[in-house]
Amino acid sequence: MTETKTTPATTGLLRIQEVAAQIGATPRSVRYWEEQGLLTPAARSDGDYRLYDTTDVERLRFIKGLRDDAGFSLAEIAQLLEDEVARERGHEAYHATTDPSERLQILRDRAARYEHQIQMLQTKIGRLQTMVDETEARVTREKAKIAALTAEMAGSAGAALKAEIALKAEIAPKAGATPTREAVG
Amino acid sequence: MTETKTTPATTGLLRIQEVAAQIGATPRSVRYWEEQGLLTPAARSDGDYRLYDTTDVERLRFIKGLRDDAGFSLAEIAQLLEDEVARERGHEAYHATTDPSERLQILRDRAARYEHQIQMLQTKIGRLQTMVDETEARVTREKAKIAALTAEMAGSAGAALKAEIALKAEIAPKAGATPTREAVG
DNA sequence: CCGAACTTTCACGTAAACGGCAATGTTGCG
DNA sequence: CGCAACATTGCCGTTTACGTGAAAGTTCGG
């Protein structure tokens, strides 16, 4: 078997093709997302190869989810992730050195951003749920009609009438109402 | 006041601009959606003006929701609504005339399609919920860090240590661990 | 150190989903 | 009937989010 050339061996960093595969996207897309300011790879190799760490992958996965699942545009995603990119990296080092109150501020900011993201997602969920509810209402109405029809077909004229009344004028009875009772099976 | 020319007076049908306004879209979009086979206006005027009824509006609203809220592509929406377009109109008349078993079949089909739509929507909701969950997990972790930090800042060294242990190695302690206790305010 | 496989940037191409004209026809109040 | 306001089809332009090479450099096992 020809061994496929995998990771840069020693480091825990991944090259673009591997992260792309992991998140189910193409290298082109990942580069484009970077171009649009959605992320910056953790590092570059000697020969300027993009190198991604686990947080990058996490982020990319999130981006992909926002696009494919939530249907956000890249611009909206950029909004959502705001300057998280610039800050995160810029502050990661800052984080290790400076005083606790600074670190606290950073942590609070991050939590706030996450919660904002949750808000957006839940708003979207709410709208989808509304659509589900509406559609379910339609289903119920159709089922009621079905019930009425089956009653009309199988049962007595009285039962059919009762069902008709229950639905009121929904079917718009153009022709004569009384069933011909010919097709029961 | 110059009276804006509104509906085609007598009929309950609306012209493209009005339905577009009602659903928050442009006439161009509505026409495009029609061009893509997502719907067919209920009627045309003498001079070939598109005329929409309430079910059209309902449908258009649904389409808009699927695009804006759910982020579906027009192609996907077309899939979702399938031949509903062709059938609905073709069967509406059929519905009024033919025998009950035929009508029953139609109703069942419709209910099935609605339930399929609900499936799609709920799948999407599920994915979004997963994203929410993940993000919430992140928030919790950040809050834990915040708690640890505040404890370290305000409390005794013992408490701080306890908090550090609780989080294990998450912050990557590059510098010396013991707090310098200089900035408490 | 060589070559296959991968990567880089640059550039152009494209499908989807409209926006925006133009040229022409339609409605309908006054 | 006249005319402003709207509609129709046709066509071209635009934005978004990539796809698809081209030309050149990088990695790395053998």
Image: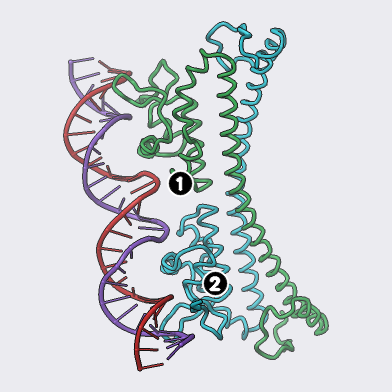
Chain colours: A cyan, B green, C red, D purple
Per the image, the residue denoted by label 1 is B73
Disc 2 residue type (three-letter): Asp
Label 1: which secondary element: loop
Q: Nearer the viewer, residue C4 or A44?
A: C4
Q: Nearer the viewer, residue D14 or A136?
A: A136
Residue A79 placement (x, y as % from top left): 50, 61
Residue A170, quarter of picture: top right
Quarter of the C terminus of chain B within the rendering: bottom right
Disc 1 residue type (three-letter): Ser
Please tell me how crowded label 1 is: few (under 14), some (14-19), or many (20+) other residues with Cα within 10 Å: some
Label 2: which secondary element: helix
- B123, above or below B30, in the image: below
Residue A114 falls left or right of residue B97 = right
Labels 1 and 2 positioned on one and the same chain: no
Q: Nearer the viewer, residue A179 or B78?
A: A179
Per the image, the residue denoted by label 2 is A56
